[in-house]
Image: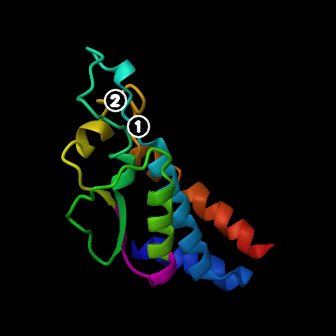
Amino acid sequence: MAKFHTSLKAYADTTGADLETIVREAIIELGTSVVMRSPVGNPLLWKPPVAPPGYVGGRFRGNWQYQFGSPTSKPLDVVDASGQISIQRITAGVTSAEAAGVHYIVNNLPYAEVLEYGHSTQAPDGMVRLSVMEFRRYLAAAANGVQQ
């Protein structure tokens, strides 16, 4: 982690880029990616295709939360099939937090881990793992945007 911070700081020093803006934008992109990759329950894809009475998909997507410094451990009672509520929650948290430090994006629903590891045909390769693999790209895009 220290090596990563040092190389990012060196980049900011040489280019004059605003390191805090770069970090915040990259974390928001990471959070957006995780949220939008999250499956929304679709009973037509289930085997058997039966949903409980009154079922509405989007609880998993609505449970992505942001926390600075330490992760939250409570799930939310939110349905957000579009992902916009979760993205706004993450954006607001990142914007108000310090840039330097540990940022957490978590989903505390009991089935989050099985979804991450392939239980859903909508996200067979997970959400978090794919988004984390793209984090350097989010940083580069944020840095390019700040430089312009």
Asked whether the beta carbons under mark 2 and mark 1 sit within 8 Å of each other, the answer is yes
Q: Which residues are magenta?
A: 95-105
Residue 80 lies left or right of residue 33; in this view the side is left
Q: Viewer-proximal residue, 4 or 20?
A: 20
Q: Is residue 39 above or below residue 96?
A: above
Viewer-nearest residue: 86 or 26: 86
- Could you tell whether 122 is left or right of 14 in the image? left
Which image quadrant: the C terminus? bottom right
Q: Which residue, given by chain and number where applicable, does mark 2 sit on?
A: 120
Q: At 59% across and 59% down in the image, what residue appears? A: 138
Which kind of residue does numbered mark 1 sit on? Answer: Pro
Instruction: Give the residue pinned by disc 1.
Output: 39
Report x, y in % for residue 52: 23, 29
What crowding class fits label 1: few (fewer than 14 Cα within 10 Å), some (14-19), or many (20 or more)? Answer: many
Spot occupied by residue 29 in the image (x, y as percentages of width and height): 55, 59
- Quarter that holds the N terminus: bottom left
Q: Amino acid at mark 2?
A: Ser
Residue 108, how many percent across, how many down?
24, 55
- Indicate the secondary structure of the residue bearing disc 1: loop
